[in-house]
Image (cartoon, rainbow, N blue to C red):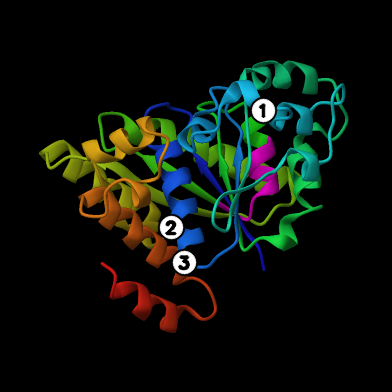
Amino acid sequence: MTRIISIANQKGGVGKTTTAVNLGAFLAHNNRKVLIVDMDHQAHATICFNVPLSGIKYSTYDLLTRQAQVPIKEIILKDIRASLDLVPANVDLASAELELSGEINRENKLRNALRQVHQAYDYVIIDCPPSLGLLTVNAFCASSEIVIAIEPEYLALHGVMRLVELVGKIIREYDRALELHALITRFRMTNLARETVEEVRRNFGSLAYRTVINLNVRLGEAISQGKPILDYDRTCSGYVDYARLTREIISEEPSWQEEAQRLAQRV
């Protein structure tokens, strides 16, 4: 069964795209077929795979809007790395929310599009925009799981609670079954960060991933080079952290024991 996971937070700069790109790359590296969907008009996930924006014929804008609706099979960029495909974004996506606002069933545009292809993938990873608008609602309605990326800083949980409220609203209004998880990103060893992590674990319980993504300059360097950390530096803490997160996520699969043991030997 395909797992469709949205990586979300209405605040920018918390490691959403870094997580989407690296998680997707690690899953593909571990023999899962992965599709990444870039739902942010800044197209950071697209850029992170070194895809030139000027060369993109179709993007998520063309997938979602009535004026230019294009079948998803014509938009997907195949094998941008082994076992990993991409639905790219570009700046056109910035106008999509306005164009979608008057359409019927507008919140299910992405969900309906993914139905055409999702069985070809083990995982679909959606990189959400830093907002709680219609594009994020589309991502959530298409998903089976949502991972909230939380940077442990002052007022971090205040914004997260708004996101949790949106998830609850979608569950109630659209009858969607959604699993909600919390992931600590950009962690620094400070008293405030440790207190925030403790509060996240109190609020989310077992739904908070045990893995913490530490602040690591090599992750940023890899992104700037258009590479996942797998292709940039396998000795840094960023590589270890995303390998561990991948192990946690794979552990939720039915055959998790055997896979978890194999992955544990790599870290």
**Dot label at residue 30:** 3
| Residue 139 lies in the magenta-colored region | yes
| Image quadrant where one finds the N terminus | bottom right
Circle 1 is placed at which residue position? 56
Check disc 1 and give the amino acid type: Ile
Against 152, residue 212 (above or below) is below
Which one is nearer the viewer's eye here, 78 or 138? Answer: 78
Residue depicted at 37% across the width and 33% down the height = 225
Tell me residue 137's x, y (percent): 66, 35
Q: Secondary structure at mark 3?
A: loop
Q: Secondary structure at mark 2?
A: helix
Which one is nearer the viewer's eye here, 54 or 258? Answer: 54
Circle 2 is placed at which residue position? 26
Check disc 3 and give the amino acid type: Asn
Query: For the stretch drawn in magenta, what is the main secondary structure?
Result: helix
Left or right for 175, reference 3 = right
Left or right for 210, reference 251 = left
Q: Are marks 3 and 1 in contact (CB under 8 Å)?
A: no
Give the alpha-carbon distance from disc 3 to disc 1, as whole Å. 28 Å
Against 248, residue 168 (above or below) is above
